[in-house]
Amino acid sequence: MGMKEKFGIKAENGNMKWNQLNSEQALEAIKEHSADKAIIIFKHSTRCPVSQMALSWFERSWKEEEMKGVEPYFLDLISYRPVSGKVAEIFNVQHESPQLLLIRNGKCTYHRSHSNISYKELQKELG
């Protein structure tokens, strides 16, 4: 069973088709799946205007044709606080919100938070 069948695409915002990250089990699957394709995780606080602004900018910039082979995951860290804590632990990053992580080969190879979240910078990193 593939990642999409197991965890499903649950939300579409603008150009984005987010996979919802809502369980700790999904994190282990993401880690394994990142051997085959780049995974991004966007950690979002629904209570924070800075997070909402960063999410909006990122979603408006997203172009599916430029991001072939990248699988985006969305984590509502207010609803799934334990999952957010596990992200920090598993990928060895400090918890921040909003936060964008790039996962490759089971490791976080790039992460940014707050106003440093940039679609163009992510593109360069994916190079």
Image (tube, rainbow, N blue to C red):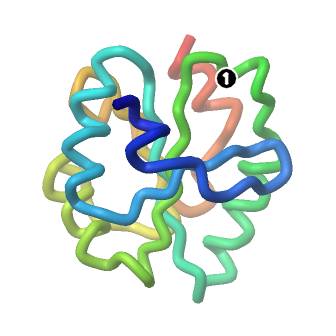
Q: How many marks?
A: 1
Three-letter code, disc 1: Met
User: Could you tell me which secondary element the residue under label 1 belongs to?
Assistant: loop
Residue 37, by quadrant, is: top left
Q: At 35% from the left edge and 33% from the top edge, which residue is drawn?
A: 103
**Where residue 15 appears, x then y in whole percent?**
82, 43
**Where residue 56 appears, x then y in whole percent?**
77, 60
Name of the residue lying farthest toward the top: 127
Q: Nearer the viewer, residue 16 or 43?
A: 16
User: Would residue 54 be found to the left or right of residue 25 on screen?
Assistant: right
Q: Nearer the viewer, residue 122 or 6?
A: 6
Q: At 72% from the left edge and 49% from the top edge, which residue is drawn?
A: 58
Mark 1: few/some/many CA within 10 Å (<14, 14-19, 20+): some
Q: At 51% from the left edge and 48% from the top edge, which residue is drawn?
A: 8
Q: At 48% from the left edge and 38% from the top edge, which residue is drawn?
A: 4
Quarter that holds the N terminus? top left
Residue 109, by quadrant, is: top left
**Where residue 65 appears, x then y in whole percent?**
78, 19
Q: Does 19 sit above or below residue 47? A: above
Residue 25, by quadrant, is: bottom left
- Which residue in the structure is indicated by mark 1? 67
Quarter that holds the C terminus? top right
